[in-house]
Image (cartoon, helix red, strand yellow):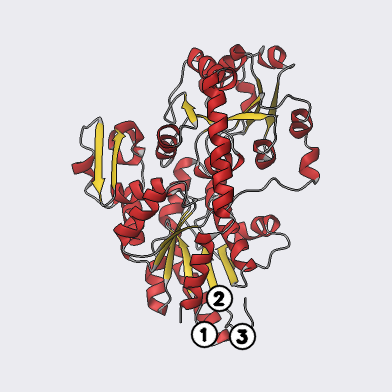
Amino acid sequence: MAEGKEEKHIVMFPFMAQGHFIPFLSLANVLTCRGLTVSFLTTTANVSKLKSQAVGSSIRFVSLSLPLVHGLPPACESTDTLSFIDGQLLFISSHKLSQPFEEWLEQIIAETSKKPACIISDVFLPWTAQSASKFGIPRVVFHTTGAMAASLLQYLFTNPVSDIIRDRQIIEIHDHCINVILRSAEVPEILRSDLFISPYPTLTVLQQAYGSAKESCSATLVNTFAELEADYVRYLEESTGKPVWGVAHPLHRPQHGINNESECIRWLDTQKHNSVLYVSFGSQAFLSEDQTKVLARGIAASKQRFIWTIKDLVGSNVNSCDFLPEDFMEATKDRGRVIHGWVPQLLILSHPSTAFFMTHCGWNSTLESISAGVPMVLWPMSFDQFINAKLVTEHLDLGLQICEGLDAIPSSDIVENTVKTAMATKIGEDMRLRALKIKESINEASCKLSGIEGFVSYVLSLC
C-alpha cells in the first residue's frame, strides 16, 4: 500500500466447506499482497487445516467457537466431513455463530479504536447482514460460484418458485439483460420438491441467503473471470444496483516440490501429450457401486489412457475402490492409474499429457480446468453444477455431457462413446484448441487484475 495511506482492515467469513474455503483463501492472499489487512474467520475445527494451506501468507486467522448443534458429530464443522443431510444441518445452523462473531467484532473495534473497512461474507451466511448492519460496517457478498450460476440461482431463489417451476419441462428466464432457457433438470433439485426431501428448512434459508445477497449488500464479488461471463456480471450489477467484480485470477502451475514426486505425476511424465483422461468428482460427490461399475466399464472399453481418483463416502467404512469390477485393474494396468484418495489436481490439469477432465462440474474444478486450458467430460450432480455444465457445453463449447443427477446411472456405452469422442476425434481436438484460446485470453485480460484492482480501490474509498 502506498506510503501515507491508512491501513485498511477487511474481515472475510466463508461458509464452512472446502469448495468455499478455496476461493476465499485465494482472494485473501491477493488482498494481503495489495497491502490490506485480512482477518479470516472460521470455526475452531477448521483453523489449523486452513493455516496449513496458507503457509507463508500474512492472513490473520480467527477461530470462532461453534455453539452446540444437536445432531452434528463433535468437531465436524465442514461439509466435507459430513454426510449430505448433516451438511444441510450445518448450513441452517450457521447463524449460531452470530454471537461469537459479534463479540469478536466488539473486541477488535475496542482494541483498534476503529471498525473494519468491510465484511466480505459468503452468500451462504445471510445472517452476517444483520451483524454488519448492527456495527455499521459495509457487507460485501462473495459468490463462490460463477456469475451465471450466481445470477440464475439469485433469480430462482428470490422469485415465487411455484410460478417459475410448476410442472414445466422448460423454464424461461427473462430479467434485465439475461434471456435464458433452462430444462427442468438444470434447476437445482431443491426447487423440484418431488426430487428433494429434507428434514430441514434448507429451501427457506437459501431463499434468505439469495434475498439478502440481492438486497443487503454494499457490493458483490464473484469467483469468476469477468471476461468469461460478462453478461452475467452485468446482470448482477443491474439486479442489485451495486458494483460487482469478478475476482478470480489465473491458476499457475505449482512450483516443483513434494507433490511433483507423487505417483500420478511421475506416470503422467511418461505419457504422450494430450493422451490422458483425468477423472475426479471432487470432495463431496461420491459414486455408488452401480455408478462406479458402469463408469469403469465405459472407461475400460474406450481403450483410452486415464487417471482416476476415487474417494470414500463420508462416514462410511467402505473402500470405494472395492466397487470397481474385478477385472478392471488388470485390464487397464498398462494404460491407467487408479488413485485412492487425494491427488494434486492443479498439477494434473496443468500437465501437458492431460487432454480432458471428467468432472462433476463443481465450480472450483470447472474454473481450474478452464484456467488450465483443459476441456471437460461432464456429469453434473447437484445445485449449481447443472448451470455450470450448461455454461461449459452451450456457452463455451468446452464439454461433452454423459449424464446428470446425483442418482443417475449412464450406460457404459454412453461413457465409452463420449470418452472416445473427447479423446480420439476432431470434436475433442477442436475443444482442446478452444480451451487453449480461452486460457490465453483469460491470462491476457487477467494480467491487469482489473476486478481485484477495482475492488481494492473501492475498499480504499470506504471511510
Q: Residue furthest left?
A: 163
Please tell me which residue is depicted at 18% across the width and 43% down the height of the picture.
Answer: 163
Indicate which disc residue 4 carries. Answer: 3
Q: Tell me the quadrant of the picture where the N terminus can be found.
A: bottom right
Relative to 367, residue 23 above or below: below
Residue receiving disc 1: 114
Asked whether 215 or 71 is in front, the reply is: 215
Q: Can residue 76 be seen by looking at this rendering? A: no
* Residue 247, percent from left and from top: 51, 57
| Spot occupied by residue 293 in the image (x, y as percentages of width and height) | 56, 18
Disc 1 residue crowd, few under 14, some 14–19, many 20+, Cα 10 Å? few
| Residue 153 visible in the shown view | yes
Marks 2 & 1, CB-CB < 8 Å contact: yes
Residue lying at 54% horizontally and 45% vertically, measured from the top left: 441
Q: Give the structural element (helix, strand or loop) at label 1.
A: loop
Which amino acid type is marked by label 2?
A: His
Q: Is residue 55 above or below residue 269?
A: below
Which circle marks residue 338 in the picture? none
Whichever of labels 2 and 1 marks the residue nearer the N terminus, that label is: 2
Q: Which residue is nearer to you in this view: 424 or 276? A: 424
Q: How many marks?
A: 3
Q: Residue at x 44, y 53 (%)?
A: 91
